[in-house]
Image (cartoon, rainbow, N blue to C red):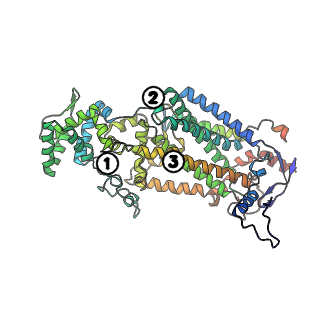
Amino acid sequence: MSKKHTTPQGPVSTIRTVPYDLLKEVAIAMVACLVLVIVLAAALSSPDVPSVTIQSWAQADPVDFTTTAANELAGSTASAGYGAPYNTTDAGQTLGPIAPSKWAGVRQPVDGANDFVINPLKHASVGDSQLTTALTGFQAAADSQKTAWLTAYTKALGDAKVQEGKVVVVPGDYGSVPILMDRLLAVARSGGLDGLLLSSGHFYQTDFTKPLLFMADGSYLSGLAAQQHLSGSQWGMMNETGQYPGQSWLWLYTVWYQIPPFNTAPNGDLLVIILMGLLTLALLLVPFIPGLRHIPRLVPIYRLVWRRYYRESAGR
Amino acid sequence: MRSTNAPGPMGERSSSWTARARDEMAERLPMANLLPDRQPYYVGSWVYVFGVVTIAALVLTVLSGVILAIAGPDWWHFSSIGRFFNSVHFWSVQVLFVFMVLHLWGQYFMASWRGGRATTWMIGVVIFAISIGAAFTGYLSQQNFASQWIGVSAKDALNAAGLGAFFNVLNFGQMYGIHVMLLPAAIIVLVALHIVWVRMKGVVRPIESSRPASRSTSEV
Amino acid sequence: MDTPAGYLHWGFILISIPNLLLIGLMIVLFALALVVPLPGEKEKS
C-alpha cells in the first residue's frame, strides 16, 4: 500500500508504507526485557561486598590504622594536604588560571588532626586520667616538639609488631604519642570511633565524609580495592567487585588515567574532566561538526540497515 | 483540525491560549503521527528495535527502583527478596546501558540527525549523560564497600571540577535523593521529549548517495 | 560470583573478563541486527 507521506514541512514524494504495530512492539520488548532481567537476577544475583568500618580496619590492620592516625596528627595525610573543599593547605588542581576547586571554596571543612584524633580522644578521656594527662601534654607541646615525636614514632611504626591487638614499637622518644595512639586504637577496635566520627554533635546524620576521608588516608581500604582491580590505575572505574560486569560505558573516562600525561600529572583529574567535557560537547554537536557528521556516509553500515530500500531503488 | 474558536472573518487568530496551544500541538504532532500504525517500508531492520528495548529496560529499572525505595536503603542487604529486587535493578541497568549504546551506534551510523532531527540527537546525548550520572549516584547509594570506594575515588575528579563542594559524593543522603528523585524525573521527561520528537519528525530517510551537496547543517 | 574476576592484560589495556564478554556480546548483537532479516520480511515486500 502506498500513501502520501506528510510531514510538518509539507507532503513529500510518496513512500510505500507497511503495517507496523507500535504498541505491540513496546509490549513485546517489555516482556522480553522482563524475562531476561528476571533470569539474570535469579541466576546471578548482584554484588554486595559489605562496607569496611573503622572498627574492621583497626582490627584487620592495626599498624596501618595507627600509622594513619599518627600521620593525621603530623598533618601529612592526603586529606590534610588536599585543599578545597576540605581545607586551604593546597591550592588544588589548576590549569593555568583555571582553578575550579579554589573558586568553589572550603565547603566541607575537615581538620584531620582534631576531627579524627584529638576530639575523639577527648571523648574517650572521660574517666581516664592517664589519657587526659597525655592529651594535655601533647597539646601543650611546641609544634617542633610534636613534629619530632611524630617523626620518630612513624619511623618506628615501620618495624611495629602487633601483640594482643596492641601496636608495639621499639622504645624511643615519642612523648605521649604512643598513649594517644594506643587509646585511639582501642576506641576504634571497640567500634566507638565509627560513631564518634559520624555523629559530630548531631543526632540525624547522612554525611559520611569524615570516616571515609580518614579511611582513605590509610592503605587498608585502597588495598582491598586493588585486590578487586578497582584502583584508578587498574581501569577501576569500569570494574565491579566479584565476577559481575561493571560500567563499560565509562571506558573513555577511565582510559586517560592509564596514560601520560594524565596518569602522573598533579592536575590529572582536572585535565580529564576538561577533556571529557569537550568530548561530550562534541558528541552532543555531532550533527553540526564537519567530518564527524560525514563518517556515517563513509562506513557502509547504513547500506546494511536499508538494503531493501537500495535494492528496490536500484531496481526501479 | 482547527478549534471551534475559528479565526474571525478578517483572519485573526483566536486569543485563547488554550485553543492556540491545542492547534499548535495538533499541527505539529497529529494523533496519527504520535501513534502511527504504518511506517515507511525502509523501517525494516532489527537495529530499529534497540531504542524500544532501552525504554523497556528503563521502565524495569524505575519499577524495581520504586520497590527498593519503598522498602528503604537497608532492606536489600538483609532480605533475600530485597536482594532479588536489587538484582533486578542491577541487571536492568546493565541491559539499559547495553541497548542505549547499541541504539547510539545505530543512530550514529544511520546519521539520524538529518532532515531537521538534530534536536532529537541532542536530547538523546543529554539522556545518555544524565543516565551516567544516575548510575553513578546509584552506585554511591548502595551503602556497601563499592559505594565507599567509588565515593573516595570519584571525589577527586568532582573536587577538581569545583563540583565536589556542592555535590558531596560522600554524603549518602544527598546522593540518594538525587538518585531516586531528581535524575529519574529528568530522564523520564527527556525520554518523553525524545519520543515526541521522533514521532514529530518521522523516521529519518535512508542516506541517498546521489543527494546533491548539503543545503543545511543537518543534512549529510 | 563474589570471588574476584579474571582480567585480560594486553599492553596498557586491562579489562575484566565479564566486561570483555559484555562488550563482545554488544558487538555480536549489533552485527546480527544488521544482517538478520526481520521475521516475515518476504511477505511484507
Per the image, the residue denoted by label 3 is B133
Q: Which residue is mark 2?
A: B78
Q: Chain of mark 1?
A: A
Task: Choose between B73 and A176: the one closer to the eye.
Answer: B73
Q: Secondary structure at mark 3?
A: helix
Q: CA distance from mark 2 to mark 1?
A: 33 Å
Assign a secondary structure to mark 1: loop
Please state the horizontal and vertical placement of residue A217, each as a whole percent of the image: 31, 43
Measured as percent of width and height from the top left, residue B26 is found at 75, 57
The residue that label 1 is drawn on is A79
Is residue B148 something one can see in this rendering? yes
Quarter of the C terminus of chain B within the rendering: bottom right
Label 3 Cα neighbours within 10 Å, binned few <14 / some 14-19 / many ≥20: some
Q: Earlier in the sequence, mark 2 or mark 3?
A: 2
As measured in the structure, the alpha-carbon distance from the residue carrying label 1 to the one carrying label 3 is: 25 Å
Left or right of A230? Residue B211 is: right
Q: CA distance from mark 2 to mark 3?
A: 27 Å
Residue at 22 percent of width and 40 percent of height:
A123
Kindly indicate whether the residue at mark 1 contacts the one at mark 2 (C-beta within 8 angstroms). Answer: no
Q: Which image quarter: residue A279?
A: bottom right
Locate residue A157, reporting x and y percent.
Answer: 21, 37
Going 64% across and 39% down the picture, which residue do you hit?
Answer: B56
Q: Residue furthest bottom?
A: B10
What's the amino acid at mark 2? Phe
